[in-house]
Amino acid sequence: MSRWKPDARGRLEKAALELYIHQGFDATTVTEIATRAGVTERTFYRHFTDKREVLFPADNPLTDTLANATAGAPAPPPLRSRCWRRSPAP
């Protein structure tokens, strides 16, 4: 019989997403994620550098694709100019 359950990374991802949805990203700790996944904090850090990496993994090809697709896009106008409304002429 195996000492550890398989797919620790997958269980950590699932636990983190459930906690983020339930209590919010800022309120969720690595300890809570690890406990919910049934692993230690050390195991969490073997798979992720921090809790942000669960959502935005460094090796995600979608992240690279998105970054490349938006690299040449023009910058949006300043927020002030987008929100500025002129009063109608009298």
Image: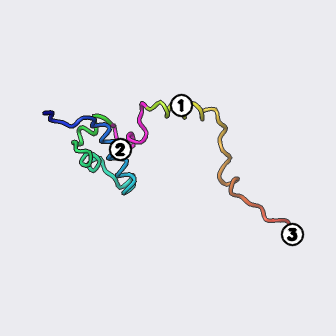
Which stretch did the figure color magenta? 48-59
Under mark 3, the amino acid is: Pro
Reading the image, the residue beneath label 1 is 65
- Magenta segment, prevailing SS (helix, strand or loop): loop
The tag on residue 90 is: 3
Say which of 13 and 43 sits in front: 13
78 is higher (above) or lower (below) than 67: below
Secondary structure of residue under mark 1? helix
Q: Is residue 55 magenta?
A: yes
User: Looking at the picture, which amino acid does disc 1 mark?
Assistant: Thr
Residue at screen point 36% across, 57% down: 23
Labels 3 and 1: the sequence-earlier one = 1
The spot of residue 89 in percent (x, y) is: 85, 65
- Check disc 2 and report its element: helix, strand or loop: loop
Q: Nearer the viewer, mark 2 or mark 3?
A: 2
Residue under label 2: 51
Query: Which quadrant of the view contains residue 45?
Result: top left
Total marks shown come to: 3
